[in-house]
Amino acid sequence: MRSLSIAGVLLFALTTGCATSQDDGLTGGLFGPAMSASKLDRAIATATAFPLGAEENPVRVYMPLGQQAYLARLRCSDGAAPAFKRDGSMGIGVYGNILDLYSVTCATDTPAAAKVHMDMYHAKHSETRPVPGFTIVPR
C-alpha cells in the first residue's frame, strides 16, 4: 500500500509540478530549478568540449518521453534504428540534475554499442544533433 501512495505522489508531481517549474526558463524538474539561465549557459559552453552523450555533456531532453523520442531518432551507419535500454540513474550531472544512462546498440552495423548519458529536465530544448557514431532523423 505504501508503494502505491509513493507512486501516486510521484505521478502527481510529474503531471503538475514539473510543467510549472519549467516555464520560468530554468532547468530543473521534480525538485525545482537546478540553476539559473546564465549559469546554464556557462555549463552548456563548458560541456561542448566533450562529446554529446558523455557524462560531461549529456543529451538534454524533457522527461522520459523526450529521452525515448531522441533515441528513436538515432540511426546506425546502415540507416537502421538502434536498440536501446535504460541502465539507470547515474547521479547529478553538469546541469545539476539527475542523469540517466542508456545502452544503445546496432544489431548488424556500427557502432556496435554506445553509452548515452541523458538529462531529462530541459523543457525548452530539443536536441537535434546525434551522439558520435550515429546519424539522426530530423523531427
Image (tube, rainbow, N blue to C red):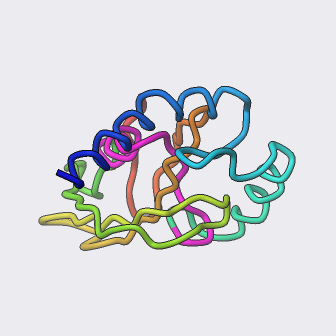
**99 sits left or right of 69 in the view:** right
Q: Nearer the viewer, residue 71 or 95?
A: 95
**24 sits left or right of 119 in the view:** right
Q: Is residue 68 found inside the magenta-colored segment of the image?
A: yes
How many dots with numbers? 0
Q: Going by the picture, which residue comes out furthest to the right?
A: 38
Residue 14, position as x, y percentages in the image = 42, 36
Residue 67, position as x, y percentages in the image = 38, 47
Q: Nearer the viewer, residue 87 or 32?
A: 32
At x 64%, y 45%, the residue is 32
Q: Nearer the viewer, residue 82 or 37?
A: 37
At x 80%, y 49%, the residue is 41
Q: Image quadrant of residue 97?
A: bottom right
Image: 90 above or below 13:
below
At x 86%, y 46%, the residue is 38
At x 28%, y 62%, the residue is 86
Quadrant where the image shows the C terminus: top left
Residue 42, position as x, y percentages in the image = 83, 56
Q: Which residues are magenta?
A: 54-72
Residue 46, position as x, y percentages in the image = 77, 65
Q: Nearer the viewer, residue 3 or 11?
A: 3
Q: Is residue 131 found inside the magenta-colored segment of the image?
A: no
